[in-house]
Amino acid sequence: MADERNDPLGDVINLLAAPLAGSIRTYEQFRKGIDELFRAVDNLNTTMENLNETAERVNRLLADVEEPVRAMAAVPHRIDELVGIMGDMSRRLGPLASFAESAGGMFGLRMPTAPSTPVQPPPAKKAAAKKQAPAKKAAAKKASPPKKRS
């Protein structure tokens, strides 16, 4: 019964194979770790390229949008400037408007001073309109038939 474990060659192989098998397993784990590290670095490179492209697109978009936004910010200042110019122009054209009104008075025209004031037609047109109106009324009276009484 003592002969069951008495294989010296098997014992030597087992003594050498056990550390060798462990070393092979360790080497395989190391190789897998290195492969995963390379994949992680590749993924990181791809992510960084995507982020760089996105940053470039955002920069282009901001460059396109920035100028109109700045122009819109200047609009209130320009509106104030326009209102000032219009007021100045109105003040400067005041004497010209009064001169035009005086000149129109010489020809029998009146310039409207407010939107509610109607413009007066020349006197010649009024006389022609008065002459035509009675003719129409007379024609209308002749056209109506006399009423019969029973």
Image (tube, rainbow, N blue to C red):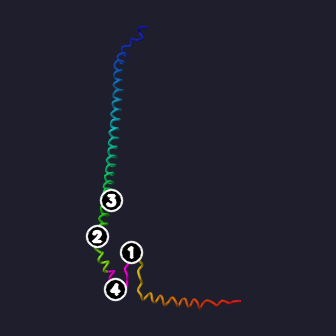
Identify residue type, mark 1. Answer: Ala
Which of the two labelled residues, at mark 3 and mark 2, occupies the earlier sequence position?
Answer: 3
Residue beneath the point at 34% across and 32% down:
33
How far across and down, in percent of the image, does residue 93 sit?
30, 75
Residue that badge 4 annotates? 106
| Identity, as a three-letter code, of the amino acid under mark 3 | Met
Q: Secondary structure at mark 3?
A: helix
Q: Which residue is mark 3?
A: 72
Upstream in sequence: badge 1 or badge 4:
4
Q: Does the CB distance between marks 3 and 1 fall below 8 Å?
A: no
Q: Quadrant of residue 68?
A: bottom left
Quarter residue 137 falls in: bottom right
Quadrant location of the C terminus in the rendered image: bottom right
What amino acid does circle 2 point to?
Answer: Asp
> Which residue is denoted by mark 1 in the rendering?
114
Which quarter of the figure has residue 138?
bottom right
Q: Marks 3/1: CA distance?
A: 36 Å
Front residue of 10/32: it is: 32
Residue 56 image position (x, y, % from top left): 31, 51
Residue located beneath label 2 in the image: 88
Q: Gap in Å between the C-alphas at discs 2 and 4?
A: 29 Å
Kindly report which numbered mark, 3 or 4, lies closer to the viewer in this rendering: 4
Residue at the spot 28% in from the left edge and 73% down from the top edge: 92
Q: Marks 3 and 2, Cα distance to the nearest angstrom?
A: 25 Å
Residue at the spot 33% in from the left edge and 41% down from the top edge: 44
